[in-house]
Amino acid sequence: MNYWLFKSEPDEYSLDDLKSEPGHTGRWDGIRNYQARNFLRDKVAEGDGVLFYHSACKVPAIVGTAQVVRAAYPDPAQFDAESKYFDPKATADKPRWFCVDIRWQSEFARPLPLKEIKQNRALAEMVLVRQGRLSIQPVSESEWRLLLKLGA
């Protein structure tokens, strides 16, 4: 089992939006960064844990957890000319972009702000601290366990 941090702008898709989906399950799509795409396509697997992170908001923070319930498959938005995620270079034979399905698991008792994460020396090597802008990023098991404790 691997662990991940998935970033989303809460006005675009929040933890509450995921929770309100049928079966608390939604498609994590719209990824248009090659490094993040490669993680989704090649590394993220069914059963993996996800930290749900709200970004581009007043207080960026980890707000809860989810679990991957369907591994990577071609993002249907890349084929939809009406979608903001349309990619004219993508074909059914050679999709360029991928998505996964995740299921809501829990909310943190309190949001865990980025500022607090950066102040914790045990998290100094976390990708979120070192390479903050990446929308899909790996989290080590020790980071995962600590973050769950801090968010409790």
Image: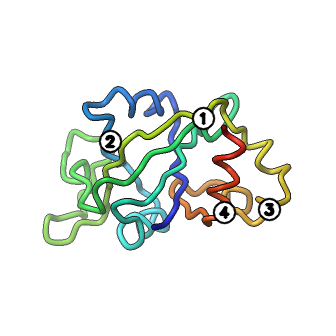
SS at badge 1:
strand
State which tag comes first along the sequence, 2 or 3. Answer: 2
Q: Which mark is residue 127?
A: 4
Q: Which residue is mark 2?
A: 84
The CA distance from mark 4 to mark 3 is 9 Å
Residue at the spot 31% in from the left edge and 45% down from the top edge? 27
Residue 124, disc: 3
Between disc 2 and disc 3, the foreground one is 3
On the rendered structure, is 93 left or right of 84?
Answer: left
Instruction: Count residues near mark 1 (Cα–Cα under 10 Å), then give few for <14, some for 14-19, many for 20+.
Output: some
Q: Amino acid at mark 1?
A: Phe
Would you identify the image quadrant in which residue 104 lies?
top left
Q: Measure how far apart labels 2 and 1 are at the Cα level.
A: 31 Å
**Which kind of residue does numbered mark 2 sit on?**
Lys
Q: Position of residue 15 (x, y in %)?
A: 47, 33
- Can you tell which quarter of the image residue 47 is in? bottom left
